[in-house]
Image (cartoon, grey):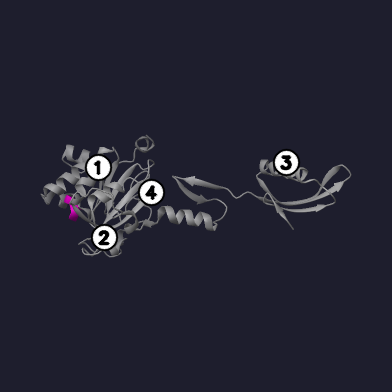
Amino acid sequence: MPVIDGVKLTVQGEIAENQIHDLLEEEKSRFAAKGKKLARVELEADGDEVIVRSFEASPIKRVRRITGYLAPTDNWNAAKQAELRDRVVQANLTAVLGKGGVEPLGVKLRVNGLSYESVVDGPGIRDTLFVQGCPRRCLGCHNPGSWDFSGGVEVDVAEAIAALPFSPLVYGVTFSGGEPFCQAEALLPIARHVKRLDLSLWVYTGYTWEELLDLLDPAVWELLTLADVVVDGPFVRELADLGLAFRGSANQRLIDVRASLEKGETVLWELRRAEILA
Ligand code: SF4
């Protein structure tokens, strides 16, 4: 059975090719208006007329997008899965970084991964830079591959700057880990770049807010002042809760950095929808 314009076709008698195409277009639009897709049709010539003897239609599979990602409403297919995989998978660092053509800044950063268009590391679509090395070693850590301080890939920060943001849709950049504050100095040029672009900057840390302030390290302090939100504290498995937004366990806090520094007390961040939609 031949397939014409995506429709399986059976023709009985003599029907001109252009007549078949016109008829198929007509039938396809008729079914599309009902939310269906013409799959098979049987045509028969009857004198000067063409009769549609039988047809078969299938419902159109619809998908919708949620914050830029494909989400299934009918069922998954390989293409949808591939798109989702491609867009949320952690990028291959050696493919993204170290491409050359970037003037080095001479500041080295050890990186664990880079995830483009994340929707779980803060509000809006974000690029998340996972740094390498974490002293905390929390039980149930989301990323134990980031613990080893000699693992990952060492890059010049200019390369990381060149890789961020990935697209104009990106609302913010998140530093995650590993422990970003163990490489605060190297992260500073990236943080300044992010703020120059007026993007939101979130930093995940295994330190508590109070511990960070006690570090009295100028680079830690500057990174703090550049961040909009710090998600603080180690992951505690007994307090884990999948229902929590942007954090793994209930002890962790989303801290509004600017408000906290201004008031001299810990102020929690609140989601302001207008901020994301702007
Ligand atoms: S602080 Fe974060 S990266 Fe470090 S071990 Fe804990 S959960 Fe993992």
Q: For ligand 1, tell me if the residue under mark 4 lies within 8 Å.
A: no
Name the residue that disc number 3 marks: 26
Q: Residue drawn 17% across and 37% down?
A: 262
**For residue 99, which quarter of the picture?**
bottom left
Residue placed at 37% from the left, 37% from the top?
Answer: 273
Tell me the crowding category of disc 1: few under 14, some 14 to 19, or many 20 or more residues within 10 angstroms, Cα based.
some
- Mark nearest the camera among 3 and 4 is 3
Which type of secondary structure does the marked residue at label 4 adopt?
A: strand
Q: Quadrant of residue 268?
A: top left
Measure the C-alpha gap from mark 1 to mark 2. Answer: 21 Å
Give the alpha-carbon distance from disc 1 to disc 4, as whole Å: 18 Å
Spatial CA distance of label 3 from label 1 is 55 Å
Nearer to us in this view, 10 or 81: 10
* Mark 3 in CB contact with mark 4 (< 8 angstroms): no
**What kind of residue is marked 4?**
Glu
Q: Is residue 57 magenta?
A: no
Which residue lies under the disc numbered 4?
117
Q: Secondary structure at mark 3?
A: helix
Q: Which residue is mark 2?
A: 153
Q: Is residue 84 left or right of residue 274?
A: right
- The answer to whether residue 49 is visible is yes
Question: Would residue 175 be found to the left or right of residue 67 on screen?
Answer: left
Can you see residue 267? no
Local packing at callout 3 (Cα closer than 10 Å; few below 14, some 14-19, many 20+) is: few
Q: Are marks 1 and 2 in contact (CB under 8 Å)?
A: no
